[in-house]
Image (cartoon, rainbow, N blue to C red):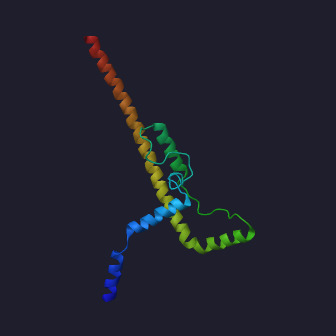
């Protein structure tokens, strides 16, 4: 019981501000700046991150749905590259973990396919609604034109 008390007391005495000051000092010493500490370009793609697009564009949705459909299938096997010893080691490792790796990839592929199918359904719904809106706008214009002709 006394040992547990010591552990709790020692946790309470940690000076978080001192640790943060040490981290800040290390950052200054190494010459890091805000741009180096950003995670925005970790992915390496030139496209905007998700959530950046504010205005709906049907063409963009169609492109994204097509991309999701094309990328739904993730292969579990890739040709081993490198020197002969490296390739052999990669093949041995692949065989050792195949029993666990392949089912995970297959499950992910099923999830990806369901998601891609759902996105295609949503796209079809959006297009259908867009057509209905266009029809209703034309009908509204006709009604408004008819009322203006009466006045």
Q: How many marks?
A: 0
Write the residue at 53% across / 45% down.
47
Write the residue at 53% across / 63% down.
105
Residue 21 found in image quarter? bottom left
Q: Indicate the position of residue 51 as horizontal and vertical percent values.
A: 43, 47
Q: Indicate the position of residue 12 as horizontal and vertical percent values.
A: 33, 75
Q: Indicate the position of residue 9 as horizontal and vertical percent values.
A: 32, 80
Q: Residue furthest right?
A: 84
The quadrant of the image that shows the N terminus is bottom left
Above or below — where is 71 with respect to 95?
A: above
Above or below — where is 4 with respect to 52?
A: below
Q: Residue furthest left?
A: 151
Q: Indicate the position of residue 69 as horizontal and vertical percent values.
A: 52, 49
Above or below — where is 27 with respect to 94?
A: above
Above or below — where is 12 with respect to 110?
A: below
Write the residue at 38% across / 29% down.
134
Write the residue at 57% across / 52% down.
44
Horizontal side of residue 99 vs 89, given as left or right: left
The quadrant of the image that shows the C terminus is top left
Q: Return the residue nearer the eye: 104 or 23.
A: 23
Horizontal side of residue 104 vs 91, given as left or right: left
């Amino acid at each position: 019981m006394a040992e547990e008390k010591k552990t709790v007391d020692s946790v309470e005495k940690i000076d978080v501000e001192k640790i943060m000051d040490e981290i800040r000092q290390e950052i200054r010493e190494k010459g890091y700046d805000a741009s180096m500490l950003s995670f925005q370009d970790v992915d390496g793609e030139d496209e905007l991150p998700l959530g950046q697009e504010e205005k709906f564009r049907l063409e963009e949705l169609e492109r994204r749905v097509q991309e999701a459909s094309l990328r739904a299938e993730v292969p579990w096997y890739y040709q081993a590259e490198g020197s002969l010893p490296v390739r052999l080691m990669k093949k041995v490792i692949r065989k050792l973990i195949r029993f666990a790796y392949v089912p995970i990839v297959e499950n992910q592929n099923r999830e990806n396919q369901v998601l891609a199918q759902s996105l295609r359904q949503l796209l079809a719904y959006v297009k259908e609604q867009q057509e209905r809106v266009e029809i209703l706008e034309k009908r509204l214009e006709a009604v408004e034109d008819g009322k203006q002709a009466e006045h």
